[in-house]
Image (spheres, rainbow, N blue to C red):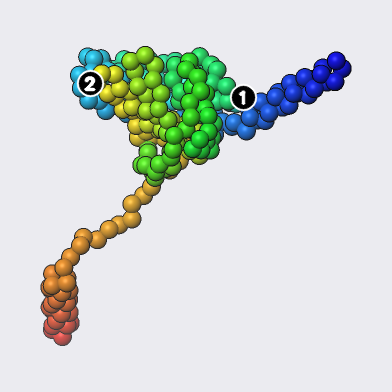
Amino acid sequence: MKKAVALGTTVIMLFLLSAALAYAEAQVGIKPGDWVRCELTTSGTPSEDTPQWVKVECLSVTGTTATLKMTMHMSSGVEQNEIGTLDVASGEGNATFQALIPANSKTGDTIQIVGYGSVTIAGEKTGTYAGASRTAVYASFSQGEMQFNCCWDKQTGILVETTLTQGSTSATFKATSTNIWQASSNPLTLPNLSIELLSICISVALAIAIVAAAVILTRHKRS
């Protein structure tokens, strides 16, 4: 009897330890003041007053829980503000959507979606988000008749793209600006010219230089 109790206690302790380790591995990848703004594109027939963009800003971080301010700007000009919490490890909180997952999540990882439950990361891809090339992880899930396809920045866990589909109507929010990373600057590119056209351009430039030099030399002799 004592051995059975001891064995049961050991199993419970190992389970709690593994759960604690899983929670410890989940980390919030953003800090207070970080924000990202996602703009909306739609297809089908959206409602009259639709969101134009959504901004998610981190107000504070405690352990694996982030307090987020979400601002939704409507086409009517009205802005709706909401402050909610989201625990990236347990999926608990009162945030209305999954704006954040654990940083450095990878394919095959199980994440907790607020108000939904467990979802498995299906894969990762590279895309341009908020002006920079970023690696994102993605997953899909549904709630009722609504299908969600979400992409989160792999390094930080912040939501960078989500497509909501219901019937023939779909809406996609995609990150267009942020202060978390810098937009890539495109280097100066020269137009593609054929060899013949390039030779003509060089000849014209040389002719102009020769004429200009001759004029300057003539003026110098006269003076």
Looking at the rendered image, the quarter that the C terminus falls into is: bottom left
Residue topped by disc 1: 62
Q: Position of residue 201 (x, y in %)?
A: 15, 71
Q: Position of residue 78 (x, y in %)?
A: 31, 15
What label does residue 101 carry, if any?
Answer: none
Q: Position of residue 59 (x, y in %)?
A: 53, 24
Secondary structure under tag 1 reads: strand
Looking at the rendered image, the quarter that the N terminus falls into is: top right
Q: Amino acid at mark 1?
A: Thr
What label does residue 168 carry, if any?
Answer: 2
Badge 1: how crowded within 10 Å, few (<14), some, or many (20+)? Answer: few
Viewer can see residue 67: no
Badge 2: how crowded within 10 Å, few (<14), some, or many (20+)? Answer: few
Secondary structure under tag 2 reads: loop
- Residue drawn 24% across and 61% down? 190
Q: Is residue 154 left or right of residue 201?
A: right
| Residue at far right of view | 2
- Residue drawn 18% across and 65% down? 193
Q: Position of residue 26 (x, y in %)?
A: 59, 31
Q: Is residue 90 above or below residue 203?
A: above
